[in-house]
Amino acid sequence: MDLKLKDKVVVVTGAAGIKGSIGETIVQTLADEGAIPVIVCRNDRGFGYEKELQERGINSIFVKTDLSDADQIEMAAKKIGDTYGRIDALINNVGVNDGVGLDASIDDFMYSLKLNMVSFFAMTKFCLPYIKKVKGNILNIGSKVALTGQGGTSGYAASKGGVLGLTREWAVDLIKDGIRSNAIVIAESWTPAYDNWIKTLENGEEKLQAIVKKIPLENRMTSPQEIADTCLFVISEKSSHTTGQFITIDGGYVHLDRALLTE
């Protein structure tokens, strides 16, 4: 299926993670489709990804940005606008499940909100003039934690709940401009960060198997590639009448009948 993403400028935040992370996988999948991924992240790994993409003949740039800093986000949006003149899609992907719970300080909670939610607002606000030029669209990467809670992570849960609220708000706010706004909701995805977390647990393998057994479809985690493929479909013309939607990619983990889990 031709998604018609060739030469589309797609901004992806938090996309300089470890190889195989969700953001990095989205960037590589965009490049494979002929799009122009723009990486916005604070990690210097992005310079290497920029070089790799440019060596493939893709006019891609890395804009090093602390996404908890609104001033840096404004400068990043200006640089992208000055470079390309337009933004065809913005994928707000940055997110850290930082464990800021009720025992954390107010400052830590506020920082979690800044990184995990305020960055979405700031990126959208400052990129919007360039999105409006081409009736581009916005895709927010959410989490099942917004819907289910998790325990011990108030900052992340509040942020991701807010992200879903913003998704619907922007769908309403921007409908007059022909701009779509949607969210992807992720549950258990096997990423390098997830692998690292499991390795820190004393009974990591046992914990992993207990989680996997609770995923109804095929008893396996969602792959970053499956998430990336859905993201590209949602930002493409093939989803031209889809807006204000939460698209859950989780093998039925959140919504399906628990009777499916009876052994």
Image (cartoon, rainbow, N blue to C red):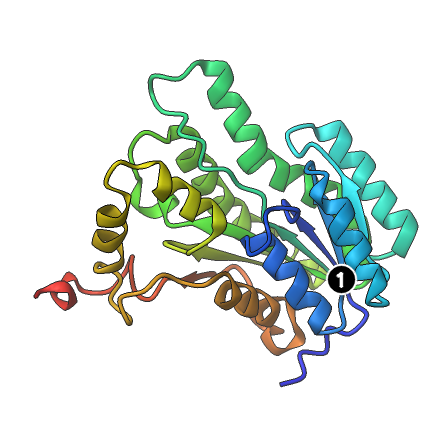
Q: In which quarter of the image is the C terminus?
A: bottom left
Instruction: Identify residue for label 1.
Output: 88
Q: Which residue is drawn at 60% across and 60% down?
A: 25
Crowd tier of the residue under label 1, counting other residues whose Cα lies within 10 Å: few below 14, some 14–19, many 20 or above: many
Q: Compared to 216, does 121 lie above or below?
A: above
Compared to 77, does 130 lie above or below?
below
> Between 229 and 117, which is closer to the camera in this rendering?
229
Number of numbered discs overlaid on the protein picture:
1
**Which quadrant of the view contains residue 125?**
top right
Q: Residue at 59% across / 34% down in the picture?
A: 118
On the image, the x and y values in percent for residue 176 come to 68, 59
Q: Residue at 78% of width from left, 60% of height from top?
A: 53
Q: Where residue 105 sits in the image (x, y, percent)?
A: 43, 14
Secondary element at image label 1: loop
Q: Is residue 249 above or below residue 200?
A: below
Percent position of residue 262, x then y = 9, 64
User: Residue extending furthest left?
Assistant: 263
- Looking at the figure, which quarter contains the N terminus? bottom right
Name the residue type under label 1: Asp
- Kindly identify the residue that appears in the image at 42 percent across and 47 percent down: 194
Horizontal placement of 87 versus 205: left or right? right
- Give the image location of residue 169, x and y in percent: 55, 48
Q: Which of 243 and 87 is in front in this view?
A: 87
Residue lying farthest to the bottom in this orientation = 1
Q: In which quarter of the image is residue 86?
A: bottom right
Q: Is residue 190 above or below residue 57?
A: above
Q: Is residue 63 at least partly visible in the picture?
A: yes
